[in-house]
Image (spheres, rainbow, N blue to C red):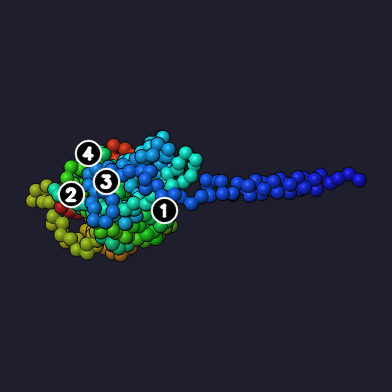
Amino acid sequence: MRNNPRTRTATGCTLLVIALAAGVTSCSGDGNPLTASPYDASDQISVNVPTGAGKKADPDKPLEITAEDSDGRITDVTAVDAIGRHLAGELSADGSRWRSTEPLAADARYTVRVSTEDDDGAPGRRVLTIDTGRPADRAYLDVTFGPEAGTYGVGQPLTAKLSRPVKDRAQRALVERALHVDSTPAVEGSWYWVDDKELHYRPRDYWPAHATIQVHSTLEGIKIGDRVWGRRSAPLKITTGDRVVAVTDAATHQMTVYRNDEEINQIPVTTGKPGFETRNGIKVVLAKEAFVRMRSSTVGIAAGSSDSYDLNVRYATRLTWSGEYVHAAPWSVDSQGRANVSHGCTGMSTDNAEWFFNTVRKGDVVKVVNSDGDQMEPFGNGFGDWNLSWEKWREGSALTGGGAARHQDASRLRPAA
């Protein structure tokens, strides 16, 4: 009778497993260096900084660990401080030296684990404790994160304001690398250097609805520049609400409001008339002011001119620091949905303005399209961050681009009806 091929294959596999098992057994004997307990490598390596209790290493000097024994080499080094920061370093190809490639933190305690092996492949280990001192002549850089803790719309950028300017690109990269943003759900995002003392962070697209976003700094004790060291900064946690986006079409004189991508209202509006055209582009709600006095003198219109005004405005939702609002404009109801007659703001009936005022929150998105006005500034006049493409945004990072400031400042107090 012919043998079953499957039976024959199974038998062969069984023999192979037995053979492999026998091989493993033979390799686990006392002669295998991989199974040996690590020996004490204290005599095999040297460190260029003082170690042990009561001794302080100079944080201005890189950490170097050298293999002193010609019969052995370093295989790995990990250095972690008490708050979990890993010290980056490079190991030479021959295993003779490991050297840190970033500054040690000042006034910190590092646990350093050094792994070695001898000519026979036997593993060695040494664990060191290194305390760093405080530099005698020092200045500090503080980071203040914004906005304040709370719930915001999905267009709200994060901000990091520095207490002193950072101009050097390498120093900017050091600072930026220490500013950590964690979002749940996770998103791709990046910092942008608005100027020497301020960074903004945004994702590629708007934040997810109902996200939790946390930002913190690990600059404490890190040398940033000559005599400048990072200091501890308060972390920040914010959340996002629904995805609320309002799109104002200046050509059709309509605002369409979406919540979580579903249309919830369409409102007749009027926007800026010729000479006072509303800015195109994406803006973020900055504030909600139930009552604002708007005067034409703040935007350079002379008293007595046919364009002059002095109005008490209700339900004003601020979009720019220069004074662009969405607000109640009962004096222009006949033009709303038909013509643009404002001085740059988006006007609507009192009832609609109250509804809009109560529907949106800080950080929600208002986008203006089909206006003859200029494009919204990316920076300096509110949060126009979303008007930069993702590629342009990444160019403003010191890690993925040039990290150069490109914005122009704008006046912050120019309400226009």
Q: Nearer the viewer's eye, disc 2 or disc 3?
A: 3
Q: Position of residue 273 (x, y in %)?
A: 23, 46
Q: Which residue is mark 2?
A: 135
**Quadrant placement of the C terminus:** bottom left
**Quadrant placement of the N terminus:** top right
Q: Residue furthest left?
A: 303
**How many residues crowd around disc 1 within 10 Å: few (fewer than 14), some, or many (20 or more)?**
some
Q: Nearer the viewer's eye, disc 4 or disc 2?
A: 2
Q: Is residue 395 above or below residue 239?
A: above
Q: Nearer the viewer's eye, disc 4 or disc 3?
A: 3
Q: Which residue is mark 4?
A: 168
Q: Give residue 351's quadrant in the image.
A: bottom left
Give the residue type that dot 4 points to: Asp
Q: Secondary structure at mark 1?
A: loop
Q: Residue at image x 20%, y 40%?
A: 167
Q: Is residue 259 above or below residue 404?
A: below
